[in-house]
Image (spheres, rainbow, N blue to C red):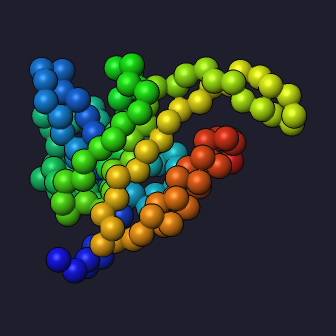
């Protein structure tokens, strides 16, 4: 079971279907898209997944999947990787939490992000750096 890197970053997005069930279609080569195009492509992908109009190339084999159960009230997601994926990033619901900012205590919105990863692809330090980068980006979304 040796890890062999894939040919691109194919972003899976977990989509719950209105009639029940779950799909994780893949947005191929997502790492090459500028953010506005990525967001537009994701909206289109989710809409087509829910209406059963996915293209064959989108129906499987994401390299990393993002899931969000926050809209169902879940605070933390501990996902299970479906091979050949190397990771699953889960986001829970946004909650108000006490936070110290510049020495002052305040209440700020916060979200729990989790990472399930295949250790053949990278160790825990790689995952920690990834989650730290996600944290930095979410702290200043205007820099996306």
Question: How far from the left and from the top, in percent, is residue 36?
Answer: 52, 45
Please give the name of the residue rendered at 19% of the width and 54% of the height, measured from the top-left corner: 82
Query: Residue 96: which quarter of the image?
Result: top right
In this rendered view, identify the residue nearer to me: 58 or 13: 13
108 displayed left or right of 37:
right
Residue 103 shows in this picture: yes
Q: Residue furthest right?
A: 103
In this rendered view, identify the residue nearer to me: 6 or 74: 74
82 displayed left or right of 28:
left
Please give the name of the residue rendered at 78% of the width and 32% of the height, measured from the top-left corner: 100
Question: How far from the left and from the top, in percent, is residue 143?
Answer: 68, 48
Please give the name of the residue rendered at 43% of the width and 37% of the height, measured from the top-left corner: 91
Please give the name of the residue rendered at 56% of the width and 50% of the height, measured from the top-left corner: 134
Query: Residue 106: which quarter of the image?
Result: top right
105 displayed left or right of 11:
right
Residue 28 shows in this picture: no
Query: Residue 133: which quarter of the image?
Result: bottom right
Question: How far from the left and from the top, in percent, is residue 68?
Answer: 37, 34
Is residue 58 shown above or below 109?
below
Which part of the image, by quadrant, shows the N terminus?
Answer: bottom left
Is residue 119 shown above or below 27?
below
Is residue 63 shown above or below 74?
below
Label tally = 0
Question: How far from the left and from the top, in percent, is residue 42?
Answer: 37, 42
């Amino acid at each position: 079971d040796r890890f062999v890197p894939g040919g691109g970053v194919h972003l899976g997005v977990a989509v719950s279907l209105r009639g029940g069930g779950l799909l994780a279609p893949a947005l191929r080569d997502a790492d090459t898209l500028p953010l506005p195009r990525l967001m537009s492509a994701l909206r289109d992908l989710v809409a087509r997944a829910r209406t059963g109009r996915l293209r064959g190339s989108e129906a499987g084999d994401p390299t990393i999947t993002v899931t969000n159960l926050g809209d169902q009230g879940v605070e933390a997601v501990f996902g299970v990787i479906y091979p050949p994926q190397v990771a699953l990033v889960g986001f829970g619901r946004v909650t108000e939490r006490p936070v110290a900012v510049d020495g002052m205590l305040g209440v700020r919105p916060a979200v729990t992000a989790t990472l399930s990863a295949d250790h053949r692809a990278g160790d825990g330090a790689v995952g920690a750096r990834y989650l730290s980068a996600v944290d930095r980006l979410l702290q200043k979304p205007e820099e996306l």
